[in-house]
Image (spheres, grey):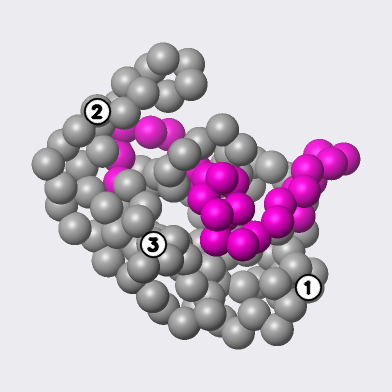
Amino acid sequence: MLDNEETDFFFKSPPDTAFAVVKDILSATPGSNHIKIYDSGSTRHISPYMNDFTDLQNTASYSLRAANKQCFNAEGIGKLEIDVPNRTDVLKLCLNKVLYSPEVGYTLISIGRLDKCGFMVTFGNGKHMI
Protein backbone atom coordinates (compact mmCIF):
# COMPACT_ATOMS: atom_id res chain seq x y z
CA MET A 1 0.00 0.00 0.00
CA LEU A 2 1.30 3.46 -0.78
CA ASP A 3 1.73 6.30 1.66
CA ASN A 4 -1.63 7.96 1.99
CA GLU A 5 -2.42 10.66 4.51
CA GLU A 6 -6.01 9.42 4.57
CA THR A 7 -5.09 6.01 5.98
CA ASP A 8 -3.67 5.06 9.36
CA PHE A 9 -0.68 3.16 7.97
CA PHE A 10 1.52 2.31 5.01
CA PHE A 11 4.28 -0.23 4.44
CA LYS A 12 7.80 1.15 4.19
CA SER A 13 9.21 -2.17 2.95
CA PRO A 14 7.43 -4.34 0.38
CA PRO A 15 4.71 -6.45 2.02
CA ASP A 16 5.23 -9.60 -0.06
CA THR A 17 3.42 -11.38 2.69
CA ALA A 18 1.77 -9.31 5.34
CA PHE A 19 2.02 -12.17 7.79
CA ALA A 20 3.75 -11.38 11.04
CA VAL A 21 4.16 -13.39 14.16
CA VAL A 22 5.17 -11.42 17.20
CA LYS A 23 6.64 -13.67 19.86
CA ASP A 24 5.54 -11.56 22.79
CA ILE A 25 2.60 -9.26 23.21
CA LEU A 26 5.04 -6.96 24.97
CA SER A 27 8.01 -6.46 22.68
CA ALA A 28 11.08 -4.31 22.36
CA THR A 29 13.21 -3.71 19.30
CA PRO A 30 16.60 -5.44 19.73
CA GLY A 31 19.21 -3.00 21.00
CA SER A 32 16.52 -0.63 22.19
CA ASN A 33 14.58 -0.16 25.38
CA HIS A 34 11.58 1.14 23.43
CA ILE A 35 8.64 -1.05 24.36
CA LYS A 36 5.60 -1.62 22.12
CA ILE A 37 2.32 -3.01 23.39
CA TYR A 38 -0.28 -4.23 20.91
CA ASP A 39 -3.45 -3.19 22.72
CA SER A 40 -6.92 -4.45 21.80
CA GLY A 41 -8.54 -1.83 24.06
CA SER A 42 -6.70 1.25 22.81
CA THR A 43 -8.56 3.46 20.36
CA ARG A 44 -5.44 5.36 19.24
CA HIS A 45 -1.79 4.64 18.51
CA ILE A 46 0.27 6.53 21.13
CA SER A 47 4.01 6.84 21.71
CA PRO A 48 6.32 8.67 24.14
CA TYR A 49 9.37 8.29 21.87
CA MET A 50 9.62 11.64 20.09
CA ASN A 51 12.72 10.68 18.11
CA ASP A 52 10.95 7.65 16.59
CA PHE A 53 8.45 9.86 14.76
CA THR A 54 9.29 10.47 11.10
CA ASP A 55 6.90 13.41 11.01
CA LEU A 56 5.58 15.09 14.13
CA GLN A 57 3.36 18.15 14.32
CA ASN A 58 2.72 19.95 17.58
CA THR A 59 -0.90 20.21 18.63
CA ALA A 60 -2.62 21.99 21.43
CA SER A 61 -2.19 19.78 24.48
CA TYR A 62 -5.28 17.79 25.30
CA SER A 63 -6.08 15.26 27.97
CA LEU A 64 -6.73 11.58 27.35
CA ARG A 65 -7.90 8.96 29.83
CA ALA A 66 -6.56 5.42 29.95
CA ALA A 67 -8.63 2.37 30.86
CA ASN A 68 -7.27 2.56 34.42
CA LYS A 69 -8.70 6.11 34.63
CA GLN A 70 -5.21 7.67 34.60
CA CYS A 71 -5.05 10.90 32.58
CA PHE A 72 -2.20 11.98 30.34
CA ASN A 73 -1.68 14.71 27.78
CA ALA A 74 -1.08 14.34 24.05
CA GLU A 75 1.14 17.09 22.65
CA GLY A 76 1.51 16.13 19.01
CA ILE A 77 0.46 13.86 16.17
CA GLY A 78 2.45 12.31 13.36
CA LYS A 79 3.90 9.28 11.61
CA LEU A 80 5.67 6.51 13.50
CA GLU A 81 7.66 3.72 11.88
CA ILE A 82 7.65 0.38 13.70
CA ASP A 83 9.35 -2.93 12.99
CA VAL A 84 6.94 -5.83 12.59
CA PRO A 85 8.44 -9.34 12.55
CA ASN A 86 7.54 -11.21 9.37
CA ARG A 87 8.67 -14.80 9.76
CA THR A 88 12.46 -14.51 9.46
CA ASP A 89 12.39 -10.91 8.20
CA VAL A 90 11.14 -7.58 9.52
CA LEU A 91 8.65 -5.30 7.78
CA LYS A 92 8.64 -1.56 8.36
CA LEU A 93 5.09 -0.45 9.07
CA CYS A 94 4.49 3.30 9.14
CA LEU A 95 1.54 4.31 11.26
CA ASN A 96 -0.16 7.65 10.57
CA LYS A 97 -2.10 9.73 13.08
CA VAL A 98 -0.03 8.52 16.05
CA LEU A 99 -0.39 10.66 19.16
CA TYR A 100 2.77 11.83 20.90
CA SER A 101 2.62 11.84 24.69
CA PRO A 102 5.81 11.99 26.75
CA GLU A 103 3.75 10.90 29.77
CA VAL A 104 3.01 7.33 28.62
CA GLY A 105 5.59 4.66 29.37
CA TYR A 106 5.56 2.76 26.07
CA THR A 107 4.19 2.77 22.53
CA LEU A 108 0.60 1.54 22.25
CA ILE A 109 -0.37 0.03 18.91
CA SER A 110 -4.16 0.04 18.60
CA ILE A 111 -5.49 -3.32 17.42
CA GLY A 112 -8.81 -1.59 16.66
CA ARG A 113 -7.11 0.88 14.29
CA LEU A 114 -5.20 -1.95 12.58
CA ASP A 115 -8.53 -3.78 12.18
CA LYS A 116 -10.13 -0.69 10.60
CA CYS A 117 -7.27 -0.69 8.07
CA GLY A 118 -7.99 -4.27 7.04
CA PHE A 119 -5.52 -6.16 9.21
CA MET A 120 -6.58 -9.27 11.08
CA VAL A 121 -4.95 -9.84 14.46
CA THR A 122 -5.11 -13.17 16.29
CA PHE A 123 -4.00 -13.76 19.87
CA GLY A 124 -3.07 -17.15 21.32
CA ASN A 125 -0.35 -19.05 23.16
CA GLY A 126 1.31 -15.85 24.39
CA LYS A 127 1.71 -14.56 20.83
CA HIS A 128 -0.22 -12.53 18.36
CA MET A 129 -0.32 -12.65 14.60
CA ILE A 130 -0.98 -9.64 12.38
Residue 56 as seen in the image, left or right of residue 80:
left
Image coordinates for residue 120, horizontal then vertical, percent: 70, 56
70 w.r.t. 108: above or below: above
* Residues rendered magenta in the picture: 100-129
Alpha-carbon span between mark 2 and mark 3 = 20 Å
Please tell me which residue lies in front, 98 or 8.
8
Residue at figure coordinates x 43%, y 34% from the top left: 105
Alpha-carbon span between mark 1 and mark 2 = 40 Å
Residue 82 as seen in the image, left or right of residue 73:
right
Residue 2 badge? none
Asked which secondary structure carries label 2, the reply is: strand
Task: In the displayed orientation, state which residue is furthest to the top.
Answer: 69
Residue 88 badge? 1
Q: Is residue 124 visible?
A: yes
Identified by mark 1, the residue type is Thr
Residue named by callout 2: 63
Asked which secondary structure carries label 3, the reply is: strand
Task: In the displayed orientation, state which residue is furthest to the right.
Answer: 125
Image coordinates for residue 50, horizontal then vertical, percent: 30, 53
Crowd around label 3: few <14 · some 14–19 · many ≥20 (10 Å): many
Residue 96 badge? 3
Alpha-carbon span between mark 3 and mark 1 = 26 Å
Marks 1 and 2 close (CB-CB < 8 Å): no
Image coordinates for residue 117, horizontal then vertical, percent: 55, 61
Q: Which badge, 3 or 1, is on the more N-terminal residue?
A: 1
Identified by mark 3, the residue type is Asn
